[in-house]
Amino acid sequence: MKKSLHFLLFIFICCTSNNLVNCQEMFKIDNACSYSKNVSNTTVNLYYPSIEAEHIIDKIMKLVSLPSNFILKASNVDNAVATLIQTESDKIERFILYNPDFIESVKSMTGNDYSAWSILAHEIGHHLSGHTLGGSEDSHQQELEADEFSGYVMYKMGASLTQAQSAINKLCSEVGSLSHPPKSKRLLAISRGWYNAKNNSPNPIKVSGGEIDNTLTYQGTIVVMIIQSAKTGESINEKVIGTKPLLKYSPTTKKWQISYTDENGNFSIIELSFLKDTEDGSIMRDTYGAKYDVTNGVNSDGMLFCQLLDFKGEAYAYISFEGLIRK
C-alpha cells in the first residue's frame, strides 16, 4: 500500500463524537432477574451493546425460532439482568442489561466463550418465561427455569455440558441465597435443558466449543473523514474519502478487516487486531503498528466509528463508515 494511502487509512479509522459512545440513558430499575444476585432500586447507565453480544442474542433467538421481545444494552450492572424499564416516552420496555467487564471476566475464568453466552441465554429465558412481568412465583423456581432454558440453548449452539455449566460452576455458591438457589440445583437445571435438547433434536452446528464461525459482514455506501475541533467540538471539515466499504468482524478473534474504494479508484484494505477493551469499545492496532480506538460495532443507524490515536494537533480525526447493512 502506498504511504499516502496508508495515511488516509490512519485518518479514516477514527471514532465518533462523544454523545454516540458515552452513556446513552440513565434509569432506575425497581426489580430485575439477575444472574447471580438480587437487584432492586438501582440506578443504571445504559450504553451501546457490543456487536458480539448482539450477534449472540440474534443467534439464540433464531435457534428458538422466536423474535426478540427485549432491548439489549451494555450497562454498569454487577453482572447481567432481565428487567422492565419505563422509558422517557412512558412506555414500559423489556431490557437485557449486561456488564461487559463481567462478561469478559467470565470468559477468562472459564476459558471458553460459551460461559458468557449461557449468561445471556439465562436472561433471555427470564423474559420468555414472563418472569419480569411480576407475580408471586418463587424466585428460586424462576432461576431454575432460566437455567434450564440456558442449558437447552447451549446444546443447540454446540456447547458441551461442561461448557454449558462452566459459568455456574465458577460464579455460584452451594449455599445459595434468598433470590437464587444453590449451585447443585442450578447445575441440575442446566443439565436437564441440555439433555432435553440433545434427546429431541440433533446439534444443528455439530462443532465443539469455540469453533463456530461468527464472522459478521457489513456492506456500506460511503466513507467520510471528519476533522473536529478539540476545543469546541465543532466539525471543521468533512469529506467523502471512499465508497463501497466492506467490513468483516470476527468476535472470536476480535479482528476487523475493512476494505473500500478510495476517491482515486484504488482498492484499500486494512486489518485491525484487538489490544484491550475500553468502556465504549476497544483499542486496536493495524499491521503497521498504528493504534485506533474503535467503538462497539455498527450502531442502529448503520455506522461504524473509530479514532486515530496517533493523530496530533488541536483537532480530532474521525471516520464514519455509513449505510452499513449486515450481509
Image (spheres, helix red, strand yellow):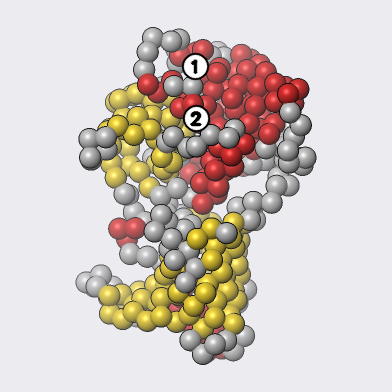
> Distance from label 1 to label 2 (Cα)?
11 Å
Kind of residue sitting beneath label 2: Glu
Q: Is residue 312 above or below residue 197?
A: below
The residue at the point 39 percent across, 59 percent down is 301
Tell me the number on the disc at residue 120.
Answer: none
Name the residue that disc number 2 marks: 123
Quadrant of the rendered image containing residue 22: bottom left
Q: What quarter of the picture does the C terminus occupy?
A: bottom right
State the count of labels.
2
Q: Is residue 214 left or right of residue 218?
A: right
Q: What quarter of the picture does the N terminus occupy?
A: bottom right
Tell me the number on the disc at residue 142.
Answer: 1
Q: Is residue 74 left or right of residue 270?
A: left
Q: Could you tell me residue 103's position as x and y percent?
A: 53, 40
Q: Is residue 137 left or right of residue 196?
A: left
The residue at the point 51 percent across, 12 percent down is 141
Q: Could you tell me residue 21's position as x and y percent?
A: 37, 56
Q: Could you tell me residue 98's position as x and y percent?
A: 45, 38
Quadrant of the rendered image containing residue 114: top right
Crowdedness of circle 2 by 10 Å Cα count: few (<14), some, many (20+)?
many
The residue at the point 23 percent across, 40 percent down is 88
Label 2 secondary element: helix
Crowdedness of circle 1 by 10 Å Cα count: few (<14), some, many (20+)?
many
